[in-house]
Image (spheres, helix red, strand yellow):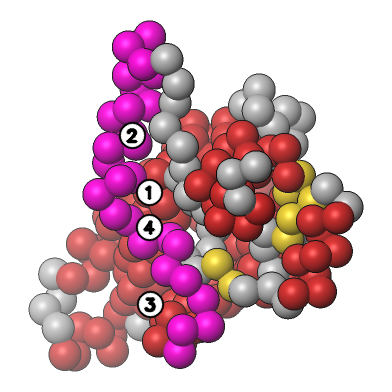
Amino acid sequence: MTTPLLSERTSVRATVASATSGYVVRFSVWQRVQHAMILVLFVLLLATGLPQKWPYADWSGWTIDALGGVWAARWLHRVAGLVFTVLTVAHIAWASWTLLTRRAKPSMLITRKDFTDAVETLQYYLGRREKPPRYPRFDYKQKFEYWGLIFGSLIMAFTGLVLYYPILFSSYLPAELIPAAKVMHSNEAMLALLIVIVWHIWGVLFSPEVFPLDTSIFTGRISKERLKHEHGIEYEEKFGKG
């Protein structure tokens, strides 16, 4: 569900060992743990949140009963939301610290090349280019999805806290913020669900490039052949043009 903001530097020993075995270390243990947590929390938040959005649907009643009732569903949703908020803040803090201390490269920052790559990719699909553009460590699709996740997570975290503590927030901010937060929270959840179904699941499950499953975020490794094919610029940075 998430892509790391910064590419953490691996040790020389790990890099050499991966290169000689035909694989390259792509994701650190911390990045893989974050992805696993996001995956679990996302499913849990949807399972407990969507039935509350459509409480009169038959499947909502079945889901609520399976979870132990509406109060149990609300409790699970709030706990998962708080954990999700803490994870989002921790990710942003860690990424900012590694960037400021130069422990990692800003490989997930959007640049002008990402927009030109998007246009050139469309031209390639339409047959107006012979070859697709060459990508660095993360391509424009991964970057756009990542930043959508970051900003969407911030919106969900803030609006969720407003709904969790309405009296506290209405004491300092206009009370109209409460119903507005409810609409934003609900609609942002649906937007996130649609993006995951239409974009992310296709890219990691059904795309011919990775079918039946892209395992790099779970194993932390990617083959040199695939790295050269999908991220040619990064491949040359690691192994040269030979």
- Depth check, front residue: 50 or 200: 200
- Is label 4 or label 3 in front? 4
> Would you say the residues marked 1 and 4 are in contact, meaning their CB atoms lie under 8 Å apart?
yes
Mark 4 and 2 residues: CB-CB less than 8 Å, in contact? no
Residue tagged by mark 3? 161
Q: Nearest to the eye among marks 2 and 1: give it.
A: 2
Please tell me how crowded label 1 is: few (under 14), some (14-19), or many (20+) other residues with Cα within 10 Å: some
Which residue is located at x 46 percent, y 84 percent? 102
- 2 or 3: mark nearer the eye: 2
User: For mark 4, what is the residue?
Assistant: 147
Which of the two discs, 4 and 3, labels the residue nearer the N terminus? 4
Q: Is residue 76 visible?
A: no
Mark 2, residue position: 118
| CA neighbours of label 2 inside 10 A, class few (<14), some (14 to 19), many (20+) | some
Q: Earlier in the sequence, mark 2 or mark 1?
A: 2
Query: What whole-number distance in Å separates the C-alpha atoms at marks 3 and 1?
Result: 26 Å
Q: Residue furthest front?
A: 242
Q: To which residue does mark 1 refer?
A: 144
The amino acid type, in three-letter code, at marker 3 is Leu
Sequence order check, earlier mark of 4 and 2: 2
Q: CA distance from mark 1 to mark 4?
A: 5 Å
**In percent of the image, x 64 and y 68: which residue is there?**
31
Q: Earlier in the sequence, mark 2 or mark 3?
A: 2
